[in-house]
Image (cartoon, rainbow, N blue to C red):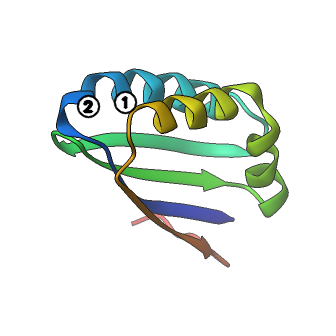
Amino acid sequence: MIVVAGAVSVPAENSEAFMAAAAAVSCASRALEGNIDYCISMQAPGAFRFLEIWESEEAMSAQFAAPPFGAFQAAVGDLGMAAMEGKKYEIASVATL
């Protein structure tokens, strides 16, 4: 299992447009085979966190070729992304709390 988590920032005035693009890519990504979850949330105007959970590296990589991901990247570029940081975690086991 692959977990991707991180943060993105855009100018605060672009928060609504970013969330619209994020909602579209989240919905499309959740429909992809091998996706377990895909969430983007606003922490404050212009500041966002993301969390993706994939069954495998291959499933995660397949999203990069999907048209919704390309549209999201183009939208974010047009919105003046100020910063992005992310980490990929490879998870060996999962247990219910």
Circle 2/circle 1 CB separation < 8 Å: yes
Q: Quadrant of residue 17?
A: top left
Circle 2: element type = helix
Query: Which label sits on residue 97?
Result: none
Q: Amino acid at mark 1?
A: Phe
Residue 3's x, y, as percent? 57, 63
Examine the rendered structure and indicate whether residue 7 appears above or below residue 26: below
Residue 4's x, y, as percent? 55, 61
State the residue position of label 2: 15
Residue 30's x, y, as percent? 62, 33
The quadrant of the image that shows the C terminus is bottom left
Examine the rendered structure and indicate whether residue 82 appears above or below residue 45: below
Q: Residue at x 74, y 33 (%)?
A: 32
Residue 55's x, y, as percent? 73, 55
The quadrant of the image that shows the N terminus is bottom right
Q: With 68 as the anchor, is 88 left or right in this view?
A: left
Front position in the image: 41 or 95: 41
Front position in the image: 77 or 39: 77
Q: With 48 as the anchor, is 96 left or right in this view?
A: right
Query: Which label sits on residue 18?
Result: 1
